[in-house]
Amino acid sequence: MMESKGSHKWTKNILNELDINPKIVVCAKKAGYVSASSILGASHNELEEKLGLSSFHIKNFIDAVTSHVLPKKTSAWDLSQTGEGDPKHITLGCQNLDNFLGGGVPAQGITEMTGQSGSGKTQIALQLSLCAQLPPVAGGLGKGVAYICTESQFPTARLQQMVKHFKAQHSKGPASYTDGIFVHHIPDMDSLVDCVRYQLPCLLSQRPIGLVVLDSVASPFRAEESNMENKNLLYTLGYQLHQLAATYHIAIVAINQVTSVIGNNNLYGHSGNVVPTLGLTWANLVTTRLMIGRTDSHVQAEQTEGSRQVKKSSSKTIVEYNVRELEVIFCPWLGKKSCPFVVTSKGIEDVE
Ligand SMILES: Nc1ncnc2c1ncn2[C@@H]1O[C@H](COP(=O)(O)OP(=O)(O)OP(=O)(O)O)[C@@H](O)[C@H]1O
Ligand SMILES: [Mg+2]
């Protein structure tokens, strides 16, 4: 993939250009961390260990490097002046779902996709990761994807199955879809916040990325006890994601899980018996909240590879798919409504 024009600033020695404690410069030089790319590409713990400095000094070091190389924050006024304020969208590859969402998944703010286990959140995120790489004329952004996995291994086999069908349907895409998806596995909450604060900006500055998927935001935070420190980290995560979305004009999709509640709970914008996890701190950081769920309906279709057979007629095999629903819980430019879809071996498909 091509590197951007400004990539030199990431690879050159910047230590003497930083306004920091000279002790940090000496230690960084000795440990070989001289370029923004090597410094921001390392984790906080790694730098602490290799430089032999305190956490406080490392934080100063990273903050100084970040503000030295990252673009200035863009205000709403700047955006309105440059005409870049209109949200672009990434197609979901399905006409009905795209129309329903006003063009697809917006490249603006944070789009949350929440729903029960097995509802289809990861399937949608995978399809979106392919669609993002289509050229704008085909509804994509013509850019790559940063896919951050926090729950399980990235579903490579399923992605490859989807790629095969996707390529047959879209002639205008890149030669290799998998090369355009940068997968990063994150084990815990601190690493996730570090990744979004330092490693992700580094990647976005060096590669043409149009979509960031966080699958999921829930598990690292749910695994830890809910306390004030975690709420602050969650806020930092959301704030940083917003900054990145506005600076680089990218789509951010954060997958969330749900938790059961007794009775209706409209506080989180949903009236069912499940609500998205992470509470109001996170809900207030989300721009568009989408809920995905299975329905009781099924549709029948001709069999494609990997689908469950239900009956065989003389010439073709018929399979049955569970109809799922994508529901808008809240979105600044869409009303509350829902749209059906199915998950097949090809990926996400409209219900006709
Ligand atoms: N090749 C396939 N063909 C048909 N349906 C499939 C295929 N692969 C996955 N599915 C459907 O997708 C479902 C899993 O969806 P997905 O992995 O997106 O769930 P999820 O919402 O991400 O769940 P979790 O919260 O556990 O990660 C399966 O239960 C199955 O119904
Ligand atoms: Mg999943």
Image (cartoon, helix red, strand yellow):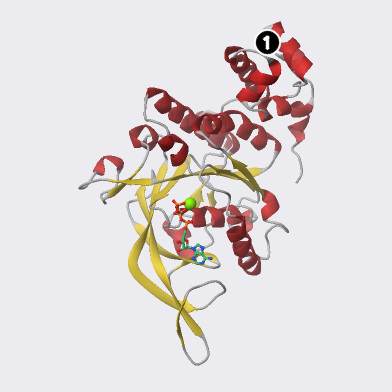
Q: Is residue 163 left or right of residue 218?
A: right
Which residue is pictured at 68% across the width and 65% down the height? 171
Where residue 305 appears, as percent x and y from the top left, is 57, 73
Which residue in the rendered view is the most extreme toward the bottom?
Answer: 314
Q: Secondary structure at mark 1?
A: loop
Q: Few, some or many C-alpha atoms within 10 Å of disc 1 (few <14, some 14-19, many ≥20)?
A: few
Which residue is found at the position 48% from the left and 27% from the top?
236
Residue pictured at 55% horizontal, 67% vertical: 346
Point out the residue furthest to the left here: 263
Residue underneath mark 1:
19
The image shows residue 308 at horizontal and vertical percentages of: 48, 74
Query: Picture coordinates of residue 33 (x, y %)?
Result: 74, 21
Say whether mark 1 is within 8 Å of ligand 2.
no
Q: Nearer the viewer, residue 143 or 236?
A: 236
Residue 82 picture quarter: top right
Quarter of the image where the C terminus is located:
bottom left
Q: Name the side, left or right, on which 331 lies relative to 39.
A: left
- Give above or below for 286 relative to 106: above
Work out which residue is located at the far top of the displayed protein and give it. Answer: 22
Count all numbered tags in the image, as a single digit. 1
- Compared to residue 264, the image places residue 198 above or below, namely above
Q: What amino acid is labelled 1 in the image?
A: Asp
Q: 5 and 216: which one is in front?
A: 216
Percent coordinates x, y for residue 269 in the rendering: 30, 44
41 in relation to 249, above or below:
above
